[in-house]
Image (tube, rainbow, N blue to C red):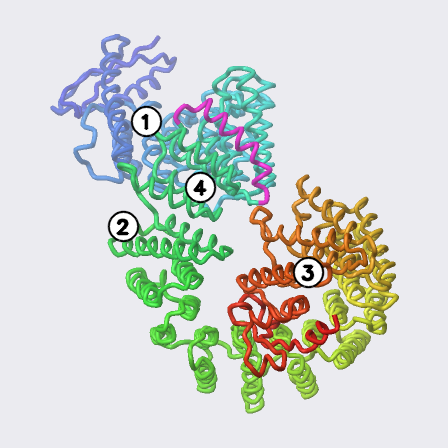
């Protein structure tokens, strides 16, 4: 071995001199000396004296060098420990390394790397040593931890390049490259990061040096960075992670890189990236494939790092959450959950036990499922809750709340009860959010009472009783919904008062600053709900206006969120119109004044509300408001469109008002609108819908003449180019109105004309055939079919039209039911046969599923049709038909059907009708006892029994007495509280007829008649027919009991007192009764 010696003078940074002895095992002494000199030149002497540097392999000298090197490393390590808190230290560390390189390798200023920071207290101040790989590794780690973006990434790459330069082009190991990769990943330059990994793979393939191979951790660094990538690059990160995973599997399985085995963390990050790409089935299927691939790798390789534990399945459940109610995805997520549960139960391995996050995600997904699918996942949710109770002793508040939400989503009483039980079971961790989840759930069900009960309980809780305004708003909505179908005035008023109280609390919370800015879910609609409630409960006018004023206060505090809308003012006006307060109209004007520029929609709503009022001058105020609408439109106000829809609203409002002159008022507005349209306001021209609304009102009020004249006017306007072409609704409404005409000939002729026009329009293709239209046309004949065989034939022709005459339209159950009603109302000989034929048609179609199943009305009309014709044969035929129906349709036969048969017997001349009606009655009673509630006897049932006895006059006094006892027994039944029935006017009329026909003249009959009159008069049910029947039995008693004058007594005229007929419908009230013909009957008798 050749020894070379050199003496080198240098200044040491540490302030002392060292002597380096370098042993060079080189065959060339000159080369050995040159190498020795180059190394020695990197030392310094603070005294600037010549120091002999000897080449030696002395252990003491090597220890001194290692100690100096350790000083530099310790300095770097100490700064590395602070980099996370002080990222800028990474630059100082790199600068120290650069200075060390410049000093040690004696680099010229041009060659030396540029520092980024000036020297400071952080800079290194120690001996010069040769920086080794550990120093470079520490600096790159610092850049990896500092996360200084692209600047840090560029500097970290420069560190690795400097290492390779000073190490005779030796490649940087993966320990150095890990920091570089982390810095590049943190700079979000993922393509460059992937390029670094590929370059390392190439170097490893070239050198076979395992220290150069990128390992699993480096690949995971890149996938972890991609999982944190921005929302805009979700698809890129998903595709990139898939590429990385496939690359790792390919390198490992081929043996090219044994360090690149993908582990459970790799798969989890890849699944996480792909979970963000989309939602629904495709995304879940993609992740499920990755999860199964992980399972396959674990089965094939058996490494513990590949075990597909519960945490690795979390991205699948996150996709279920993101899918927001996708039922199929949720079903698959539950399949994964059940698979984990089975593995845990089978192996006992805690890694497979579903973690709390899985429960939370599944509960959240179940809570977002649609109501239509909620019942299908109910079992899954129940299983999940049971497992949670077993596996999680103390679930977090969030998990508990999501579980309760999942139960509340099912929206039924049982599920809400279970949700409440769940909260009670974990009452220790239940907070105000859990309570409010229950409150909102019950509110969605419309159970305002339970929601209020829980609200009171929450307020009484010590400590955490934070309350969201959205919770209070949901209770108001529940109160509004629950009162919608509740007709009880007291309940509605109570709901309105509670809603007002809660609204006041909301207002107070906003005014006192108790509502956080991030809280949402409530706006002006909550005020609308309260106003709607106040309208239904006829609330106080002053309080209605106060609600508007509170809303305006909040609008100033929270602009736009509580701005009163036209809907708000409309609801307020509606409420004022219904409140019944004398101040209502004045308050309406006050509300209108609050609107700076009331648009036409608000004015139209005000008009409709005023039109519904019952105060004096309603018509004038309505006209004034309508004129305001017209004036504003003429002035160019286009904030809302004035068109036929406005007119429709006005007409609907007027026709809904319970006023006899409503049709006339509506017609007046219609004619005014027509005149305005002719004068220039063409947008206000009434259209077909307007006329349909008016026609519907005429039909409702039975204004047949007005309906017909309006119909003619509608057609005249249509011929002049207005949009008033009659449609199916028009013809149906006109037919209904015309059918109310008491003049049968005129009504039938007009119905015939309508039918002919409908057939013509359908034939031309201007009118689409409509089943409901034909149903109405057929039914319109029912009012005028008595004894008219031609009417029956026309109805039957219409039925044939809809059955065979038109494509695209077919009869429904209502068609056949209306036809049967026409036949049932007719006494024509063919009616009963046609009704039976129609019944069998409907029966066959219902059996085939072509129409709806038959109902009780269909049976009742057919039975009634069978009772027409010859009295004896008809009732016998009807009885046989009912007996046949009992074998096939017993469930459809109801009280009305049996009453129809009873009425037929009661009005027949059947010799044994009393016995037969008694048998039918007993059958009804027996059916009632076995639970058929639709067969309970009613007042009409008993009335027909009494009439059957009353019309069974027989020459045998014994039989008459028996029949009278039958009538008396059932008459007394109606006056027995236990029976649950109340008598009506027909009860007294029929029983008095029984007295007159079945009892002989005498004191007994007179006393009985007197008692019946007393009972009837107390009930307020006395009619002229009752007075006549009583007079037939005892004329003098009637004259004594009723009001008369000397002149009226002479003319046999009596007057029914007002109190005696108070419960008789007005159309049947006839207070003056002429008994002249009764006296003649009495004398003859």
- Examine the image and state in which quarter residue 733 appears: bottom right
Q: Is residue 713 left or right of residue 477?
A: right
Q: Nearer the viewer, residue 897 or 597?
A: 897
Mark 3, residue position? 995
What is the distance, in whole Å, between disc 1 and disc 2 at their CAs?
A: 53 Å
Dominant SS in magenta: helix
Vertical order, 1079 against 213 (above or below): below
- Examine the image and state in which quarter residue 10 appears: top left
Per the rendered image, the range of residues in magenta is 372-394
Q: Is residue 387 left or right of residue 826?
A: left
Mark 1 vs mark 3: in front: 3
Q: Residues within 10 Å of mark 2 (few under 14, many from 20)?
A: some
Q: Residues within 10 Å of mark 1 (few under 14, many from 20)?
A: many
- State the SS at label 4: loop
What is the distance, in whole Å, between disc 1 and disc 3 at their CAs?
A: 120 Å
Q: Earlier in the sequence, mark 3 or mark 2?
A: 2
Is residue 392 found inside the magenta-colored segment of the image?
yes
Q: Residues within 10 Å of mark 3 (few under 14, many from 20)?
A: many
Which numbered circle lies on residue 138?
1
What is the distance, in whole Å, between disc 2 and disc 4 at their CAs?
A: 38 Å
Mark 2, residue position? 514
Residue 702 shows in this picture: yes
What is the distance, in whole Å, between disc 3 and disc 2 at their CAs?
A: 79 Å
Q: Earlier in the sequence, mark 2 or mark 4?
A: 4
Mark 4, residue position? 229
Query: Which quadrant is home to the C terminus?
Result: bottom right
Q: Is residue 313 left or right of residue 879?
A: left
């Amino acid at each position: 071995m050749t020894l070379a010696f050199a003496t080198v003078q240098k200044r040491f940074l540490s302030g002392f001199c060292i002597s380096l002895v370098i042993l060079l095992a080189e065959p060339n002494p000159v080369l050995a000396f040159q190498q020795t000199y180059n190394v020695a030149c990197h030392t310094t002497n603070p005294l600037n004296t010549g120091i002999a540097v000897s080449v030696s392999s002395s252990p003491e000298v090597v220890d001194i060098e290692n100690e100096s090197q350790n000083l530099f490393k310790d300095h770097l390590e100490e700064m590395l420990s602070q980099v996370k808190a002080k990222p800028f230290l990474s630059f100082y560390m790199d600068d120290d390394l650069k200075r060390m390189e410049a000093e040690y390798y004696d680099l010229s200023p041009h060659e030396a790397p540029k520092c980024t920071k000036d020297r400071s207290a952080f800079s290194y101040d120690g001996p010069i040593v040769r920086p080794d790989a550990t120093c470079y590794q520490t600096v790159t780690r610092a850049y990896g931890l500092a996360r200084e973006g692209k600047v840090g990434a560029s500097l970290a790459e420069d560190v690795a390049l400097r290492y390779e330069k000073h190490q005779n082009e030796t490649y940087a190991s993966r320990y150095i490259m890990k920091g570089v990769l982390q810095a590049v990943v943190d700079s979000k330059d993922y393509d460059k990061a992937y390029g670094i990994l590929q370059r390392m793979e190439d170097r490893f393939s070239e050198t076979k040096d395992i220290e150069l191979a990128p390992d699993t951790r480096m690949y995971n660094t890149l996938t972890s960075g991609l999982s944190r990538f921005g929302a805009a690059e979700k698809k890129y990160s998903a595709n990139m992670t898939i590429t990385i995973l496939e690359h790792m599997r390919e390198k490992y399985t081929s043996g090219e890189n044994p360090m690149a085995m993908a582990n459970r963390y790799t798969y989890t990050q890849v699944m996480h990236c792909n979970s963000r790409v989309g939602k629904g089935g495709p995304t879940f299927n993609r992740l499920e494939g990755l999860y199964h691939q992980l399972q396959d790798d674990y089965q094939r390789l058996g490494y513990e790092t590949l075990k597909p534990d519960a945490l690795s399945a979390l991205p699948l459940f996150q996709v279920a959450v993101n899918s927001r109610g996708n039922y199929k995805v949720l079903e698959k997520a539950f399949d994964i959950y059940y698979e984990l549960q089975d593995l845990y139960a089978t192996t006992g391995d805690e890694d497979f036990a579903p973690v709390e996050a899985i429960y939370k995600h599944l509960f959240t997904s179940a809570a977002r499922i649609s109501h239509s699918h909620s019942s299908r996942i109910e079992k899954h949710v129940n299983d999940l809750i049971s497992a949670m109770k077993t596996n999680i002793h103390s679930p977090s508040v969030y998990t508990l709340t999501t579980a309760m939400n999942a139960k509340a989503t099912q929206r039924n009483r049982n599920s809400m009860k279970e949700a409440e039980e769940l909260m009670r079971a974990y009452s220790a961790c239940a907070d105000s959010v859990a309570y409010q989840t229950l409150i909102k759930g019950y509110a969605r069900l419309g159970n305002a009472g339970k929601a209020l009960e829980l609200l009171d309980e929450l307020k009484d809780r010590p400590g955490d009783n934070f309350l969201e305004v959205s919770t209070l708003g949901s209770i108001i909505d529940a109160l509004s919904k629950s009162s919608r179908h509740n007709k009880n005035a007291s309940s509605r008023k109570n709901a309105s008062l509670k809603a007002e109280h809660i609204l006041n609390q909301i207002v107070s919370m906003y005014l006192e600053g108790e509502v956080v800015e991030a809280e949402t879910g409530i706006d002006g609609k909550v005020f609308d709900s309260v106003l709607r409630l106040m309208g239904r409960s006829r609330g106080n006018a002053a309080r209605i206006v106060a609600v508007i004023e509170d809303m305006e206060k909040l609008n100033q505090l929270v602009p736009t969120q509580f701005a009163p809308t036209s809907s708000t003012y409309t609801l307020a006006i509606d409420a004022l119109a219904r409140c019944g307060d004398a101040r209502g109209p004045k308050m309406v004007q006050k509300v209108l004044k609050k609107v700076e520029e009331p648009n036409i929609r608000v004015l139209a709503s005000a008009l409709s509300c005023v039109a519904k009022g019952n105060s004096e001058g309603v018509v004038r105020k309505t006209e004034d408001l309508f004129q305001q609408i017209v004036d504003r439109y003429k002035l160019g106000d286009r904030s809302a469109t004035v068109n036929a829809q406005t007119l429709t609203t006005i007409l609907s409002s007027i026709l809904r008002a319970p006023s006899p002159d409503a049709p006339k008022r509506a017609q007046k507005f219609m004619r005014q609108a027509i005149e305005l349209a002719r004068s220039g306001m063409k947008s206000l021209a009434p259209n077909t819908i307007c006329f349909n609304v008016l026609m519907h009102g005429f039909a409702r009020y039975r204004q047949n003449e007005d309906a017909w004249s309006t119909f003619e006017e509608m057609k005249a306007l249509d011929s002049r180019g207005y949009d008033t072409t009659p449609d199916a609704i028009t013809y149906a409404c006109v037919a209904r109105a015309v059918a109310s005409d008491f003049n049968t000939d005129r009504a039938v002729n007009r119905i015939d004309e309508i039918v002919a026009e409908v057939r013509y329009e359908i034939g031309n293709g201007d009118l689409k055939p409509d089943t409901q239209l034909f149903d109405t046309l057929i039914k319109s004949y029912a009012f005028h079919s008595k004894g008219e065989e031609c009417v029956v034939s026309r109805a039957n022709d219409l039925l044939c039209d809809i059955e065979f005459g038109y494509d695209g339209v077919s009869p429904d159950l209502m068609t056949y039911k209306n036809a049967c009603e026409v036949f049932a109302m007719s006494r024509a000989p063919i009616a009963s046969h046609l009704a039976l034929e129609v019944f069998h048609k409907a029966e066959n179609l219902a059996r085939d599923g072509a129409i709806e199943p038959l109902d009780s009305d269909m049976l009742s009309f057919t039975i009634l049709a069978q009772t027409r014709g010859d009295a004896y044969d008809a009732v016998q035929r009807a009885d046989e038909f009912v007996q046949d129906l009992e074998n096939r349709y017993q469930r459809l036969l109801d009280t009305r059907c049996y009453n129809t048969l009873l009425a037929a017997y009661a009005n027949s001349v059947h010799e044994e009708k009393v016995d037969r009606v008694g048998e039918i009655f007993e059958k009804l009673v027996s059916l009632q006892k076995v639970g058929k509630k639709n067969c309970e006897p009613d007042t009409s049932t008993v009335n027909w029994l009494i009439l059957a006895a009353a019309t069974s006059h027989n020459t045998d006094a014994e039989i008459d007495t028996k029949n009278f006892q039958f009538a008396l027994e059932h008459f007394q039944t109606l006056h027995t509280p236990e029976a649950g029935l109340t008598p009506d006017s027909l009860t007294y009329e029929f029983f008095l007829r029984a007295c007159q026909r079945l009892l002989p003249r005498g004191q007994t009959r007179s006393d009985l008649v007197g008692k019946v009159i007393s009972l009837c008069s107390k009930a307020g049910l006395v009619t002229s027919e009752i007075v006549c029947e009583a007079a037939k039995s005892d004329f003098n008693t009637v004259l004594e009991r009723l009001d008369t004058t000397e002149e009226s007594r002479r003319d046999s005229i009596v007057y029914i007192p007002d109190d005696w007929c108070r419960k008789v419908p007005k159309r049947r009230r006839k207070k003056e009764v002429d008994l002249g013909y009764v006296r003649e009957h009495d004398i003859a008798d």
